[in-house]
Amino acid sequence: MGFDSLFYARIEVQEHNWRQANRALEFAWRASPSLGLSAQVLAGASFLGSYDPPTGFFFDVLGKTDPVVNDPTLDTYNLEQKVANLTLALDAQYAASNAGIINLSAGSDFCYGQYRKRKGEIQKHSLRRRRQLHEPL
Protein backbone atom coordinates (compact mmCIF):
# COMPACT_ATOMS: atom_id res chain seq x y z
CA MET A 1 0.00 0.00 0.00
CA GLY A 2 3.00 2.28 0.30
CA PHE A 3 2.69 3.34 3.95
CA ASP A 4 3.10 1.79 7.40
CA SER A 5 -0.06 2.99 9.11
CA LEU A 6 -3.38 4.69 8.62
CA PHE A 7 -5.21 6.60 11.34
CA TYR A 8 -8.58 8.20 10.79
CA ALA A 9 -11.14 10.09 12.82
CA ARG A 10 -14.49 9.60 11.16
CA ILE A 11 -16.03 6.23 11.80
CA GLU A 12 -19.58 4.92 12.18
CA VAL A 13 -20.69 5.62 15.77
CA GLN A 14 -21.68 2.05 16.72
CA GLU A 15 -18.40 0.65 15.44
CA HIS A 16 -16.51 3.41 17.23
CA ASN A 17 -18.30 2.67 20.52
CA TRP A 18 -17.61 -1.05 20.16
CA ARG A 19 -13.93 -0.50 19.30
CA GLN A 20 -13.48 1.88 22.23
CA ALA A 21 -15.23 -0.44 24.71
CA ASN A 22 -13.18 -3.42 23.51
CA ARG A 23 -9.86 -1.59 23.30
CA ALA A 24 -9.78 -2.21 19.57
CA LEU A 25 -9.24 1.30 18.24
CA GLU A 26 -5.94 0.10 16.74
CA PHE A 27 -5.86 -3.00 14.58
CA ALA A 28 -4.01 -4.71 11.75
CA TRP A 29 -5.80 -3.90 8.52
CA ARG A 30 -5.33 -6.74 6.09
CA ALA A 31 -6.20 -5.03 2.82
CA SER A 32 -5.68 -8.01 0.52
CA PRO A 33 -5.92 -11.70 1.42
CA SER A 34 -3.96 -12.63 -1.71
CA LEU A 35 -1.03 -10.34 -0.81
CA GLY A 36 -0.97 -11.48 2.83
CA LEU A 37 1.25 -9.65 5.30
CA SER A 38 2.82 -7.48 2.60
CA ALA A 39 -0.48 -5.57 2.37
CA GLN A 40 -1.02 -5.34 6.14
CA VAL A 41 -0.81 -1.95 7.83
CA LEU A 42 -1.43 -0.66 11.32
CA ALA A 43 -4.77 1.14 11.34
CA GLY A 44 -6.60 3.04 14.01
CA ALA A 45 -9.59 5.19 14.79
CA SER A 46 -9.59 8.41 16.78
CA PHE A 47 -10.44 8.08 20.47
CA LEU A 48 -13.02 10.85 20.23
CA GLY A 49 -14.44 9.67 16.92
CA SER A 50 -13.70 13.05 15.34
CA TYR A 51 -10.85 15.47 14.70
CA ASP A 52 -11.82 17.57 17.69
CA PRO A 53 -9.32 18.12 20.48
CA PRO A 54 -10.14 17.13 24.07
CA THR A 55 -12.75 19.31 25.77
CA GLY A 56 -11.24 22.61 26.88
CA PHE A 57 -8.43 22.58 24.28
CA PHE A 58 -10.08 23.97 21.15
CA PHE A 59 -7.83 26.99 20.68
CA ASP A 60 -8.85 28.04 17.21
CA VAL A 61 -10.07 31.58 16.59
CA LEU A 62 -13.54 30.04 16.12
CA GLY A 63 -13.40 28.24 19.47
CA LYS A 64 -14.55 29.46 22.85
CA THR A 65 -11.87 27.78 24.96
CA ASP A 66 -10.11 29.82 27.61
CA PRO A 67 -6.44 30.28 26.69
CA VAL A 68 -3.68 28.82 28.82
CA VAL A 69 -2.66 31.54 31.28
CA ASN A 70 0.72 30.71 32.77
CA ASP A 71 1.31 33.87 34.80
CA PRO A 72 0.47 33.04 38.44
CA THR A 73 0.08 36.72 39.30
CA LEU A 74 -3.05 36.94 37.13
CA ASP A 75 -6.53 36.12 38.44
CA THR A 76 -7.14 34.03 35.31
CA TYR A 77 -4.09 31.80 35.94
CA ASN A 78 -5.11 28.29 34.91
CA LEU A 79 -1.94 26.48 33.91
CA GLU A 80 -2.07 23.74 36.53
CA GLN A 81 -5.76 23.08 35.82
CA LYS A 82 -5.19 22.97 32.06
CA VAL A 83 -2.30 20.51 32.43
CA ALA A 84 -4.36 18.37 34.84
CA ASN A 85 -7.33 18.35 32.46
CA LEU A 86 -5.18 17.43 29.48
CA THR A 87 -3.51 14.69 31.51
CA LEU A 88 -6.93 13.23 32.40
CA ALA A 89 -8.01 13.33 28.77
CA LEU A 90 -4.82 11.62 27.60
CA ASP A 91 -5.01 9.03 30.38
CA ALA A 92 -8.54 8.12 29.25
CA GLN A 93 -7.34 7.81 25.67
CA TYR A 94 -4.37 5.68 26.72
CA ALA A 95 -6.62 3.39 28.76
CA ALA A 96 -8.79 2.74 25.69
CA SER A 97 -5.78 1.94 23.52
CA ASN A 98 -4.57 -1.60 23.02
CA ALA A 99 -1.26 -0.41 21.57
CA GLY A 100 -0.50 2.56 23.84
CA ILE A 101 -0.99 5.01 21.00
CA ILE A 102 -2.17 8.54 21.74
CA ASN A 103 -3.11 10.61 18.73
CA LEU A 104 -3.96 14.07 19.99
CA SER A 105 -6.33 15.83 17.60
CA ALA A 106 -5.97 19.57 17.28
CA GLY A 107 -9.25 20.71 15.76
CA SER A 108 -11.99 20.07 13.27
CA ASP A 109 -12.07 20.89 9.58
CA PHE A 110 -10.71 24.37 8.85
CA CYS A 111 -10.08 25.01 12.56
CA TYR A 112 -6.30 24.95 12.96
CA GLY A 113 -5.66 28.70 12.92
CA GLN A 114 -4.12 28.90 16.40
CA TYR A 115 -2.69 25.38 16.67
CA ARG A 116 0.97 26.20 16.05
CA LYS A 117 0.84 29.09 18.49
CA ARG A 118 -0.77 27.00 21.26
CA LYS A 119 1.01 23.69 20.62
CA GLY A 120 4.29 24.93 22.06
CA GLU A 121 2.63 26.12 25.27
CA ILE A 122 0.87 22.81 25.84
CA GLN A 123 4.01 20.75 25.08
CA LYS A 124 6.25 22.86 27.31
CA HIS A 125 3.95 22.71 30.31
CA SER A 126 3.04 19.05 29.82
CA LEU A 127 6.73 18.14 29.81
CA ARG A 128 7.29 20.21 32.93
CA ARG A 129 4.40 18.44 34.67
CA ARG A 130 5.69 15.02 33.60
CA ARG A 131 9.09 15.83 35.05
CA GLN A 132 7.44 16.94 38.31
CA LEU A 133 5.75 13.56 38.53
CA HIS A 134 9.05 11.77 37.75
CA GLU A 135 7.42 9.79 34.98
CA PRO A 136 9.62 8.51 32.17
CA LEU A 137 9.06 10.13 28.80
Image (cartoon, rainbow, N blue to C red):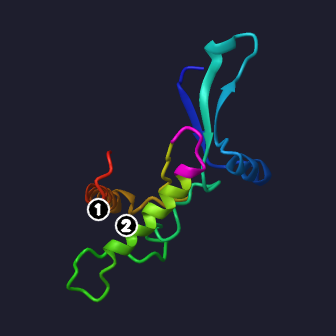
- Residue 5 in which image quadrant: top right
CB contact under 8 Å: marks 1 and 2:
yes
Instruction: Residue type at mark 2: give it.
Output: Val
Find numbered disc 2 in the image and state the secondary structure of the residue it sits on.
Answer: helix
- Residue lying furthest right in this view? 14
Give the residue displayed 59% in from the left and 40% down from the top. 98
Give the magenta range: 94-100
Q: For marks 1 and 2, give the CA distance.
A: 7 Å
115 vs 31: above or below: below
Q: Quadrant of the N terminus?
A: top right
Mark 2 burial class by Cα count in 10 Å: few <14, some 14-19, many 20+: many
| Dot 1 or dot 2, earlier in sequence | 2
Give the residue displayed 60% in from the left and 25% down from the top. 41
Give the residue displayed 20% in from the left and 85% down from the top. 73
48 relative position to 101: left or right: right
| Of 4 and 63, the residue lying toward us | 4
81 vs 110: above or below: below
Q: Quadrant of the C terminus?
A: top left
* Residue 97 belongs to the span the image colors magenta: yes
82 relative position to 58: left or right: left
User: Mainly helix, strand or loop, the magenta region?
Assistant: loop
Instruction: Residue type at mark 1: give it.
Output: His
Q: Can residue 68 be spotted in the picture?
A: no
The x and y percentages for residue 47 are 60, 52
Find numbered disc 1 in the image and state the secondary structure of the residue it sits on.
Answer: helix
The x and y percentages for residue 89 are 50, 61
131 vs 75: above or below: above
Q: Which residue is mark 1?
A: 125
Q: Which residue is mark 2?
A: 83
136 relative position to 73: left or right: right
